[in-house]
Amino acid sequence: MVKVIASSVRKGNVIDVDGKLYVVLTAENFHPGKGTPVTQVNMRRIVDGVKVSERWRTTEQVERAFVEDVNHQFLYEDGEGFHFMNPENYDQIVVDADTMGDQKAYLQEGMVCILSMHEGVALALQLPRHVILEITETEPVVKGQTASSSYKPAMLSNGIRTAVPPHIDAGTRVVIATEDNSYVERAKN
């Protein structure tokens, strides 16, 4: 265990609070005009999945658990969960849907992700920053809307809604940022 200041806690970190391990879901630093800056952390207890919200002064010490980030390749999903393989030693691991969260929509067969492991248990998943998906449906272009940089709603092949520029049509492959579901650019290939 390593002690770090609360303001350095980030999403995906594993911290120890009162002897229990938690994975950080969100961490925000608030600096009010008057008073002490605080860090608001939403986290999930690893053993039972209970979500907890905690608030610390930014200078308070928090225990960070030792977590190993290991590259794993996504294989498939079944009733057991999501199956990943370590490409170095070919060990396979099953990750449950609670650990995956809403990131599971972006998983594609063969995709290399980073699993945060603690004593052989997967605690969190880090997806690649960008994925290439296809637009399945979008609104037609309205003539005369070229002056403003307006975006139109679109549905991606994984079922997630996003906003794309007017020149993008259904069937176009686009690069999407996994962090906030936003359009980055048209896919090059």
Image: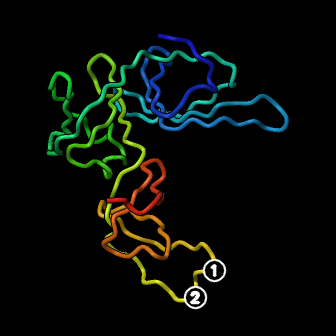
Front residue (pair 9, 18): 9
Residue at the image point whose x is 62% and y is 23% from the top: 6
Q: CA distance from mark 2 to mark 1?
A: 7 Å
Kindly identify the residue that appears in the image at 70 percent across and 37 percent down. Answer: 30
Characterize the local packing of mark 2: few (<14), some (14-19) or many (20 or more) Cα atoms within 10 angstroms.
few
Q: Tell me where residue 188 appears, x and y as whole percent.
A: 36, 59
> Looking at numbered disc 2 in the image, what kind of residue is underneath it?
Gly
What is the three-letter code of the residue carrying label 1? Ala
Of 116 and 134, the residue lying toward us: 134
Q: Are marks 2 and 1 in contact (CB under 8 Å)?
A: yes
Count of picture labels: 2
Is residue 13 left or right of 121 when viewed as pictured? right
Name the residue: 21% across, 43% down. Answer: 110
- Residue picked out by circle 2: 144
**Circle on res. 29:** none
Disc 1 element: loop
Residue at the extreme bottom: 143
Reply above or below: 36 against 102.
Answer: above
Q: Quadrant of residue 86?
A: top left
* Residue found 41% across the figure and 34% down from its top: 50
The quadrant in which the C terminus is found is: bottom left
Residue linked to disc 1: 147
Across and down, in percent, residue 3 comes to: 56, 12
